[in-house]
Image (cartoon, rainbow, N blue to C red):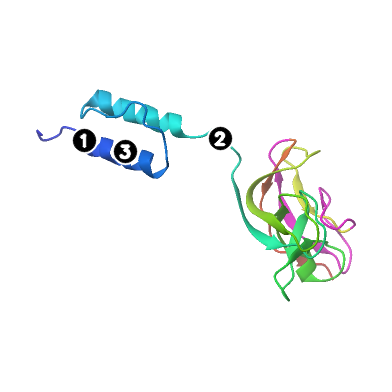
Amino acid sequence: MAQGEPNLEGAIKILVDLLTANGFTMSRSPYENNFRGLVDALIDFKEGFPTFAPLQVGFNATAFQDVSNGDALFMRTSDGQVGKAIAADGTVENATVVGFANDSVSANDTVKVVVAGLKTLSSLDPGDLFFLSDSTAGAITKTPPSGSGKAITRVGEASTATDLAIHIEPPILLR
């Protein structure tokens, strides 16, 4: 290979490694060691990606009470189980949102808790900030709580009328 020429063989090998590691279909394989082979590998790489779905990062936990899809959840320090968070009972623990329920489950069942990404909800106003409710356990509201013994816990911002961009902040207990 002359100096200054691109290493097509190396680039194709890297793409093949990525395609193989991610289980992509290599419909144009075997790839020739030239620009056509590189283009074929890139096309297979592009076509291998699934349709974009909203990113969600989360974990599984046991619910100590019935929870509904979309409920804001807190985790009990005593046993690591999750339940509906609320900003009104004067405790930081119950107002510390760890994430949102991704399914409706009964007490003692496992629920996926979404901690980052987008959570599909309803009746959101794009661009509005949302806070943990002080009147309904597990609910969120555009109006931050006020008054002694309540907590302000920002949980995210609506990116669309149905998607909450999760951005959970620690609670601020009002005195």
The quadrant in which the N terminus is found is top left
Q: Which mark is residue 43?
A: none
Question: Is disc 2 placed on a helix, strand or loop?
Answer: loop
Tell me the amino acid under the disc marked 3: Val
Q: Position of residue 102 (x, y in %)?
A: 71, 50
Quarter of the image holding residue 113? bottom right
Q: Which mark is residue 9?
A: 1
Q: Which mark is residue 52?
A: 2
Query: Which sits in the foreground, 31 or 167?
Result: 31
Frontmost of labels 2 and 3 is 3
As drawn, the residue found furthest toward the bottom would be: 78
Magenta span covers which residues?
A: 135-160
Q: Is residue 107 magenta?
A: no
Tell me the amino acid under the disc marked 1: Glu
Question: Is disc 3 placed on a helix, strand or loop?
Answer: helix
**Which SS does the magenta portion mostly show?**
loop
Query: Which sits in the foreground, 162 or 47?
Result: 47
Tell me the amino acid under the disc marked 2: Phe
